[in-house]
Image (cartoon, helix red, strand yellow):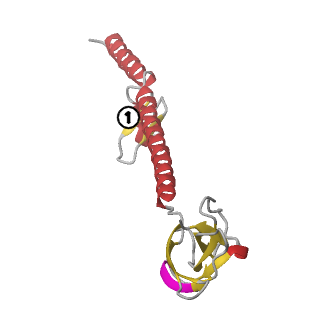
Amino acid sequence: MGWPFKRVVAGIVVLVVAALYFTGSLDNLLYKVHLNFDKCGENGFGAVFCGSALTQYENRINAAEKAAQQAERALTTTTATSTAATSTAAVVPASAVGSVTSKSLPDSTEAEATFTATYTCASTETSCIWYGEASQYPSGTPCPSVFDPSRVMWTGTVQQTAGSETSGTAYQPNPGSDKACIYVHDASTDVDHLAN
């Protein structure tokens, strides 16, 4: 085994090492000394990826980030929809209920009536200031949606919170007007609510 044989062996070794280097097979070993052939990268756990393995790893990371972003957007949309639905469902409108009993006063043209008005302010209101009122109409006439002061037969006292008020009053019946329309006036919103 002479000199030519050693040269052949050395040439084969060089060719094998060159083939391994240029195919990127040694990149993981050479990355730390920056002699890698293909592009390499290291993740947070110290694992080294080179060449096509790095491309695959980056694609997996990008896909995971995309999936996380889509999930976050879906969660944000669901939360916004749920919040909107909850807000809509939570709004309670104002409600007014009223009743009246009346009787003629003996030896008088007047009558006496006892009115009850119950009011719950809307949940969106910050204060609940209201009072009851009633007006007279003929029995065949529907109650208008707004109180008419020219037909007044009763005005209650101002209330500071939701609740009920009952009070009686004597009044002069208008000819042909035998029906009482009861209202609650919400002073916070300046709106009349028909209560019967």
Residue at 51% over, 54% down: 84
Choose between 37 and 52: the one closer to the eye. Answer: 52
Occupied quadrant, residue 181: bottom right
- Image vertical order of residue 70 relative to residue 76, above or below: above
**Quadrant showing the N terminus:** top left
- Observer able to see residue 95: yes
Judge left or right: residue 106 versus residue 8. Answer: right
Q: Residue 59, image x and y in percent?
A: 45, 32
Judge left or right: residue 37 versus residue 183. Answer: left
Choose between 108 and 14: the one closer to the eye. Answer: 108
Q: Residue 10, image x and y in percent?
A: 36, 18
Give the class, few, some or many, for how many residues have Cα within 10 Å of label 1's Cα (few <14, many ≥20).
many
User: What's the magenta region?
Assistant: 162-169
Choose between 127 and 134: the one closer to the eye. Answer: 134
* Magenta-colored segment: predominant secondary structure: strand
Residue that badge 1 annotates: 28
- Observer able to see residue 187: no
Please check the rendered image and state whether residue 168 is part of the magenta-colored stretch, yes or no: yes
